[in-house]
Image (cartoon, rainbow, N blue to C red):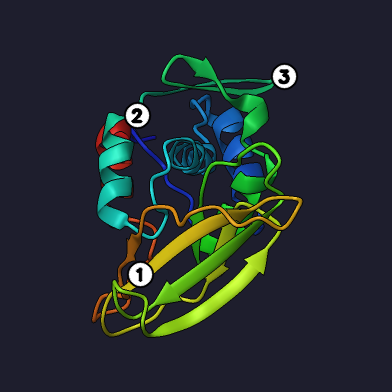
Amino acid sequence: MPKVSTIAIDGPAASGKTVVGRLVSARFGFQFLDTGLMYRAVTLAAIQQSTPLSDDVALATLAGKTEIAITDTPDGTSIVVNSADVTNSLRDTKVEAAVSAEESGQLVASWNVGMGQPNYRVQIAKDKAFNDIIIDETIDKAEYAFEPFEGDERYLRVKSIEQDGYEGPWGSTQTIQPLPEEPVNYWPLGLWTIFTIILI
């Protein structure tokens, strides 16, 4: 049998890639690496560091600076990100929502949750002055998913709404990049390039 350094298994979500990967690695004595956990680990790091999930360049930069260690045993997998064990955090609601949105092709904006701030007002506009507002919604979670778009940049801002109805000031304006002219996987290609360099 020829020497094999890396076997990659690709396919749509929930198609059994992890199960097949574990079976193949056990059969041939290979080390199994669940890159889906790496995907979630970078997503968690992006949420924790308020890196926009729509910014592929920023995500690729973040991935390059993020140290990820995965330990896989017959009893399960643990993952450490920048010296912190995040195994139990990879299924958090915010991570699940972000991953689900990315798999469905949506973009996700997220922000830090403040005490006593159960609601948020989200605006997206076509101009930095927010004169041409296309989305103005009040939501009850610290994230907002929306469809990718073509054309010019758009701008997003968020303010908190306290329990008594008081609205705080607008947060900093975030720039949302449109889809590139040629369709590509909107999760950063640079991210997977970095992972490939690490794995080979």
Mark 3 lies on residue: 75
Q: Which of 104 and 45 is in front in this view?
A: 45
Q: Give the amino acid at mark 3.
A: Asp
Quadrant holding the C terminus: top left
Residues at badges 3 and 1 in contact (C-beta under 8 Å)? no
- Residue at position x 25%, y 41% from top? 61
Q: Can residue 119 be seen in this view?
A: yes
Identity of the residue drawn at 49% across and 42% down: 47
- Looking at the image, the residue that sits furthest to the right is 163
Q: Which mark is residue 188?
A: none
- Residue 102 at what x, y percent from top left? 51, 61
Q: Which amino acid does label 1 sit on?
A: Tyr
How far separated are the C-alphas under marks 1 and 2? 27 Å
Which quadrant of the figure has residue 198? top left
- Please state which of residues 162 and 114 is positioned toward the viewer in this rendering: 162
Q: Which of marks 3 and 2 is nearer the N terminus?
A: 2
Give the CA separation, mark 3 to mark 1.
46 Å
- The residue to which callout 2 is attached is 66
Instruction: Choose top left, top right, bottom left or bottom right for residue 116.
Output: top right
Residue 158 higher or lower than 89, as above or below: below
Label 2 sits on a secondary structure element that is loop
The amino acid on which the numbered mark 2 sits, given as a three-letter code, is: Thr
Query: Which residue carries the number 1 mark?
Result: 155
User: Does residue 169 appear left or right of residue 65 in this picture?
Assistant: right
